[in-house]
Amino acid sequence: MKHRVISRKLVACIVFLVILVLLPIFLKSPYELHLLITIMTTSIAALGFRLVYNTGKTSMAQGSFVAIGAYTSALMVIRLGLSFWLTLPLAGLVAAAIGGIIGYPALKLRGAYFTILTFGLAEAIHLALLNGGNFTGGVMGITEIPSPVIVLPGQASIEFISKVPFYYLALALLVLTLVVMYRLDHSRLGRIFGAIHDNDRLAESLGINLGMYTTLAFTIACFFSGLAGAFLAHYVGVITPSSYGLWQGVYYLIYVIVGGAGNIFGPIIGTAGLTYLSRFLIAFGRYQLIIYGAILIVFMMFLPNGLLSLLGRRPTHFPGVDRIRGYISRSRE
Amino acid sequence: MALLEIQGLTKVFGGLTAVNKLDLTVSQGEIVGLIGPNGAGKTTFFNLISGVLKPTRGKIFYKGKNITGLKTNRIASRGIVRTFQATSVFPEMTVFENLAVAHHLQTKASFMGAIFDSPAAREDNRDIEQKTMSILDYMGLIPFKDELAKNLPHGHLRLLGIALALAANPELLLLDEPITGMNPEEVNTVMGKIEGLWEKGITLVVVEHNMKALMKLGHRIVVMNFGRKIAEGTPEEIQHNKEVIEAYLGTEEVV
């Protein structure tokens, strides 16, 4: 007799999701909503970083792909007159394509060499956007990016004027990202990514094509970064070459290390925790960055698997096997 | 039938010639022992066959096809799998998970299928589970199946290393010092397992320093020194070969 067991984790997720959905009803402050929107969109990019990080490659360029997504969507809407709802996924695809093409040769480098290359990559993208002339708007970037509008049947439409519709869109995008990342983790691909992370030489000797899989992870990460970028372009309304770049890449690293790379919720916890912390650290002005650096070092030394590892459970490194265990127990019923 | 044919294999690193014009033929169903002092080039030789290194000169043929210069994962998919000297496992995964991922070459479902849990992916998982348990059973590792690989005692790590190579479904298995550092009891166990692999039809090339063990197991012994093949023959012939004795036997390295 087979029956579906609804796990406690799933219930917890649903409850949390309901809370998040109902939150704007009670939370009236635009600033608080803005913080949450920022946390959610940053988490999307941080989850992309995590995916690449879990194949053993630390990429500092994810912020640049947020920028690529932002510019792509803004340009397509303003210059080509396309609907935001089309340019949103397109921006993700463009970022993914560029990521795949640049990533494939880059990912042949190992360890620190790859990371150094991504520093250079981030700078190169920054320069390309800066020197894009009329195409990218140069140093001023692109302004007056229109807010999205949902056109409903029957002449009505939902305009994105207050922060509330943006909040729900960001939430939807984050949920989408989480679902995809969860499915990846719990599949054969997740096992392979983890094997490459643990011992890539061994993985290769067992028949795993390193280039293909690391490029796949990188491409998927760039897609979601592009998605986040497209959202941000139309949320903030302005995009410049310095809006998103190397610095964001560094932040994603810190958020993922602090929250924990083992679990898909780690990056969200890291992002949320440090974003709220930064409110208090604002008083320190420029020294804020030193504190972030110190936090990163402390975590890497004493809690490399992040806050989530404090829960004591083994990180869901290769939960793909849980599927297999499920078959063992179900076949015994 | 010649499974592996190596012609004039040479590898030069700057000023050092690690492997020097090596010729070797391995027939299907053989167990070939490869011995030589440390630094003779044995591991470099394995690296060349398995695609970790590209030869400077020479050719490698597998089942009649030229595989020289192919990437490691392509060579593995053709049937040549090797183990590593410093035991290679996936430390942060359990023994079971280690083996599950090693079955990669035998999965059938596509990417999207794997992500979205298609029927093919589910069948893959069932298949992998069965094969994994079977190998774990053969290697005597079932009690450890949920243990993180990094926590395994040394002897079991080597067994896991061999188990992983076995999961990749090799026709030709290159074992790099499988029993180095083991006590006599462990040696017996592992050599027994290795012989069992041969009985299953896998052709073996084994690098080892333990002469006693190789003499019992190997059909043919090849001796390397300074990157060259200096002798080849049955275990008895090798033991009485003057050059080999001079270069290698009689030193403290040999058990």
Image (cartoon, coloured by chain):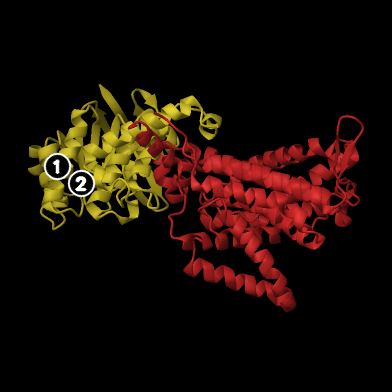
Chain colours: A red, B yellow
* Left or right, B31 with reference to B23: left
* Left or right, B95 with reference to A121: left
Q: Is residue B242 visible?
A: no
Reading the image, the residue beneath label 1 is B214
Residue at image coords 17%, 51% = B247
Tag 2: Cα neighbours inside 10 Å, few (<14), some, or many (≥20)?
Answer: many
Residue at image coords 45%, 29% = B122
Query: Which part of the image, by quadrant, shows the N terminus of chain A?
Result: top left
Does the residue at mark 1 contact the one at mark 2 (Cβ under 8 Å)? yes
The chain containing the residue under callout 1 comes to B
In the figure, A75 relative to A138: above or below? Answer: above
Q: Nearer the viewer, residue A105 or A129?
A: A129
The chain containing the residue under callout 2 comes to B
C-alpha gap between disc 1 and disc 2 = 7 Å
Could you tell me the amino acid type at mark 2? Glu
Return the x and y of residue A200 as percentages of the image width and height. Answer: 44, 47
For marks 1 and 2 on the same chain, the one whose residue lies earlier in the sequence: 2
Q: Quadrant of residue B71?
A: top left
Q: Nearer the viewer, residue B15 or A183?
A: A183
In the figure, A108 relative to B103: above or below? Answer: below
Tag 1: Cα neighbours inside 10 Å, few (<14), some, or many (≥20)?
Answer: many
Q: Nearer the viewer, residue B232 or A5?
A: A5
| Mark 1: secondary structure | helix
Residue at image coords 43%, 56% = A313
**Residue B208: numbered disc:** 2
Q: Nearer the viewer, residue A117 or A32?
A: A32
Could you tell me the amino acid type at mark 1? Leu
Return the x and y of residue A246 as percentages of the image width and height. Answer: 70, 59
